[in-house]
Image: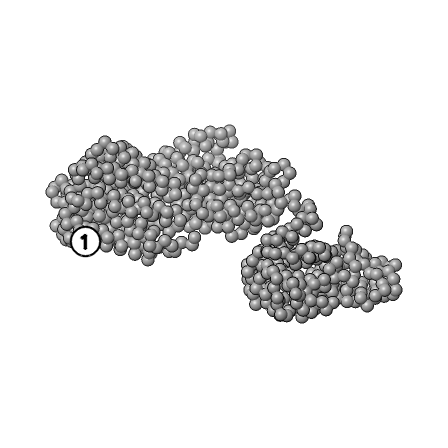
Amino acid sequence: MVTKTIKVVNEQGIHMRPAGMLVAEMKKFPNCNVTLKCGEKTAKATAVMQIMASGIKCGSEVEITAEGENEQAALDKAVELFETGFGE
Amino acid sequence: MRIVDLLSKESILLKASPKNKQEAIDKLVELQVKGGKIADKEAYKKGILAREEQGSTAVGEGIAIPHAKSDAVKGPSLAAMTVPDGVDYEALDGEPSNLLFMIAAPMDGDVHLEVLSRLMTILMDEDFRAKLLAAKDKNEFINVIDEMEQEKYPDEKKEQNVSGDGSYKVLAVTACPTGIAHTYMAAEALEKAGKKMGVPIKVETNGSGGAKNILTKDEIAACDGIIVAADKAVEMSRFNGKKVYKTKVSDGIKIPEELINKIVSGDAPIYNHDGEITDGGSGDDETFGRKIYKQLMNGVSNMLPFVVAGGIFIALAFLIDTIAGAPQDSTFGTYTAAAEFFKTIGGYAFNFMVPILAAYIGMSIADRPGFLVGLVGGYLATTGSTFSSVGGDVPSGFLGALFAGFIGGYIMLGIEKLCDNMPKALNGIKPVLIYPLAGLGVIAVIMCAVNPIMGYLNTGLSNFLSNMGDSSKIVLGCILGGMMSIDMGGPFNKAAYTFGITAIAAGSYDIMAAVMIGGMVPPIAIALSTTFFKNRWNEEERKNGPVNYIMGLSFITEGAIPYAAADPLRVIPSCLIGAATAGGLSMAFDCTLMAPHGGVFVFAVVGNWPMYILSLVIGSLVGMLLLALLKKKVNE
């Protein structure tokens, strides 16, 4: 299991488009369980609705955890997406 | 930010069957527009489509949440649509969508994300989604969401109610000059907004029936601040030291949330009853003209009941004497005991009319100390006191009283300013002794100085009329008619009326006929105008309009005073020209009258009465048309 905490940089927070992007990327790691933890809320990185329901705003800290096959690659990809602000 | 507060009934469409994504978007945009928060439909739709181009907003589970953050959005809002058979919204999972929520968010803030997050949170519940799809009507749809929100966010529900100890966070007072509609509309809007925002609010209405739902001392002490949305003076001293935001009553209707926010955010300035508003703030951004209007209307609306009740009493007296068959001469109206009762008491009520006008103008300028200067100043205008004849000489009428109300009010403010420098020890006796005493002295001197001018005017006019005797009768008739209506009880009116009575004594009866008709036209012209040109008058003026038919027909010119006082520059010229027309025609037709009053009740003794009636009708119509022409439409 690998974990990293990052800060949300895109101004609009994790709205639907970034959430969708994340989900699409994470689905490429079918045997790896990736979760996001923001405040008290936890969301599966492959469930758009759960991510949206967390309402992750710009500047908030998110703890990303990956566990399973290719867990480091999955985590790196997720972190990359967050750090590049999902291309925004 | 509750979902149910963002979703209005107009923006819900159940059991829709759009053919494709395009049509679904069109329908949802349409629903958003109905909700009223979209300033520019095309721009908003463009935002929605641009978002869809980046990827479908159908998130799976049959849910689609198209959204746009745009300048075209005035405030956050939601539209909802259920599609039982589903529509292909190009979902990631390829499944059709059957629950569609469209979000409109303004550019600033995180509303967008909050709404999205909240929607997702509740929509994750499968039972909830099923209930939404099964909802039979819009009310049920909203109730399902409401229940769900209360369950998921139990804390908010409590905030909706009055805070724990039963106190209110925000208080408000609403008042409009008429006190019939706007007062209550503003109160309702504020209460609704308070509920929506979860801010406990209590609103006092200062309507025509007196203040209702009055704020108590404890409530005022416990609240964060007070909103005063009023177009007339309200009792302010009780708010001393509290945060008060003063504004127009229409703001209470239009922007209640904004007003509540002013108090909640602590932006409102602290109100200091003794003088200026401290702590900066922008509570005093009214224009001078608006202030004057407000003060004037405060006087007029308080004067109206006196005019109406007194006028009807006097008309009753004439009616009683007509039935009793009293002789139609100068005793008409007081001939029988019953008539005398009504005419005398009605006359007493009338006597208060002009002082009350001045008193309430004074009070709206300088609060309670202004009441005294206005009342006494107005009374001095009716007695016509001068230095040489303090008991009274020539009344300056309602124009003099208007002057007394305004000048008295502002002088009182000046006196209060001057007294600021007095030792603090005297503070206690300022309002009970110093202000009233100084105010009374100053207004007495001013009115005694002003009234003689009216006296000269009156003498000059009388002489002028006497010298007119030789020239054209018709011109004289026009002048007399006009004079009767120019000040409705002031020097012009008085001079014309006295001239008419003198003429009766001298045996020429045509002059009194022209005088009376001139005094009958203004109320009738106004009454006609309130009947046929309703949009020129406010609600209260319209409601009192019919009474002016009775007033006019009874030769009670004073019925027109409240209307003239409210808008002298337009009403007086209209009445003047109408009355002059009638006076001139009456002379032209050689109409005569031997009784000095009585209106329609003495028409039996009018010489050439058919033409007299015709003159009255023409004069009144002229007045009415001019009123329609000159007066602007009222936005109510």
Q: Position of residue B291 (x, y in %)?
A: 43, 47
> Measuring 49% from the left and 48% from the top, which residue is drawn there?
B185
Q: Position of residue B20 (x, y in %)?
A: 63, 70
Amino acid type of the residue tagged 1 in the rendering: Leu
How many labels, in total?
A: 1
Instruction: In this rendered view, identify the residue nearer to me: B59 or B558.
Output: B59
> Measuring 20% from the left and 53% from the top, which residue is drawn there?
B614
> Measuring 62% from the left and 51% from the top, which residue is drawn there?
B143
Residue assigned mark 1: B585
Q: Can I make out residue A11 in this image?
A: no
Q: Quadrant of residue B391?
A: top left
Q: Can I make out residue B12 in this image?
A: yes
B227 on left or right of B3? left
Instruction: In this rendered view, identify the residue nearer to me: B610 or A25.
Output: B610
Which type of secondary structure does the marked residue at label 1 adopt? Answer: helix
B556 on left or right of B164? left
